[in-house]
Amino acid sequence: MNITRNNVDALNAVVTVEVSKNDYASKVEKVLADYRKNASIPGFRKGAVPMSLIQKQYGKAVLLEEVNKLLQENLNNYLVEEKLDILGNPLPKITEDFNWDSEDYKFEFELGLAPEFNVDLTAKNNLTQYKIIADDTMLNAQVARIQKQYGKIVSQTEVAEGNDVSGVFTNEERGINNRTTLDLELFADKKTAKAFIGKKVGDTVVLKTKGLFNDDHKLMDVLAIGHDDVHGLDIEVNFTIDEVIASEPAELNQELFDKLFGPDVVHSLDELKAKIKEDAENQFVQQSNQKFLNDVTEFLIETTKFDLPAEFLKKWIQTAGENPLSPEQAEEEYARSENGLRYQLIEGKVITENGLQITFEELKDYTSGLIKKQMAQFGQMNPTDEDVQGIVARVMSNQDEVKRLSEQVMNEKMLNLFKDKVKAKTKEVNYDEFIKVMYGEA
């Protein structure tokens, strides 16, 4: 067998595999001999069927199968030995004059080669790493929510000031039908809240969506519609009241503090706010980190320039899925996936150049930490190491879970690397300001 490569250009190559009769003859003969031993054909004893009949009946199929096995094995070995970094899979070239009745064969495969490029993490940029703080406005609102949540709830028949109302938002034309509970103080216009005063269970209030709340994302939540649909939405919606809720705020006393955080953890309003601030800002770190990771990803895609074997990849996409795609469909799919492929290559380069690896012990420790957090959420604050490690062992016996957790660990490593090497400015914002930045409204 002879394998040669012709580099069409820096991103495309054609590999030619020449298969001679000597490469496959013995394998074909052995398979046909096994067929003959087990063949059951009327008029012949088992094992006594003439080889010419076996050859006639099975010869072509066995030949195709054995030659294909040789092709796949030797082509894969060649790609490994030559250390070729390819994109997609080799694509066989269709040859019009190919003839299986010949004894020697020549096969050609198109290859899409990964590009050579450099990644500069220290390049000048306009990136910002946000530090989200829980300000006094948020802390006071959270304390009020806690008092309301743990206060005494009394159902009413008629809406009065300070009440919440539960009901269903509907708009038949837009397909809106969502049950929610409204705090009337959240309306942007106080006149809207007053429209509810005096209404009873079963009454319907007609509301205009434009400017209903100061934050359109609140409108997105109460109507259960998408982010793209909510901006600029200017329609009328019906809100039919099915419950009126009055609340007597809970007292800020030791009994409430212990109920929230356990015995003697918090002793005063100031300590309560400090605990809320600590917990909130710990949660904000994850959101800030995710935005920074997303922003760096976009920055690297935009600034790391390299060409791709686009035409090869479009042809490969046509055949890569369960169902073949048309050239037009492949073009659309390539357009959708190009940035993902570019970042995949960039990420692989960053991982290799910075020696980012995941050890088995790291994966175990990460999994153990996640499990302890989950157990704490269900009140198991001090699980035994034996219990935790037992769950870790079960989780890590699932290959899909191992893959998912490995990706999370690598994401953390990438994030830490970016924080260390990407020179972004740091900006302190409150949560509302951060949300506006997230959705491009700042």
Image (cartoon, rainbow, N blue to C red):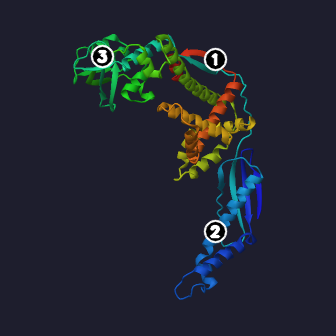
Q: Is residue 340 visible?
A: no
Residue 314 x %, y %: 60, 46
**Residue underneath mark 1:** 426
What secondary structure is found at the residue carrying circle 2? helix
Per the model, the C-alpha gap separating discs 2 and 3 is 78 Å
Q: Amino acid at mark 3?
A: Asn
Q: Where does residue 323 sit, x and y in percent of width and height?
A: 51, 53
Which numbered tag is attached to residue 19? none
Q: Given the image, on which type of amino acid does mark 1 rest? A: Thr
Mark-to-mark CA distance, 3 and 1: 41 Å
Helix, strand or loop status at disc 3: loop
Q: Earlier in the sequence, mark 3 or mark 1?
A: 3
Q: Quadrant of residue 387?
A: top right
Nearer to us in this view, 296 or 107? 296
- Label for residue 163? 3
Q: Nearer the viewer, mark 2 or mark 1?
A: 1
Residue depth check, mark 3 versus mark 1: number of the one nearer the observer: 3
Residue 64's disc is 2
Q: Are marks 2 and 3 in contact (CB under 8 Å)?
A: no
- Residue shown at 67%/42% (left/top)? 360
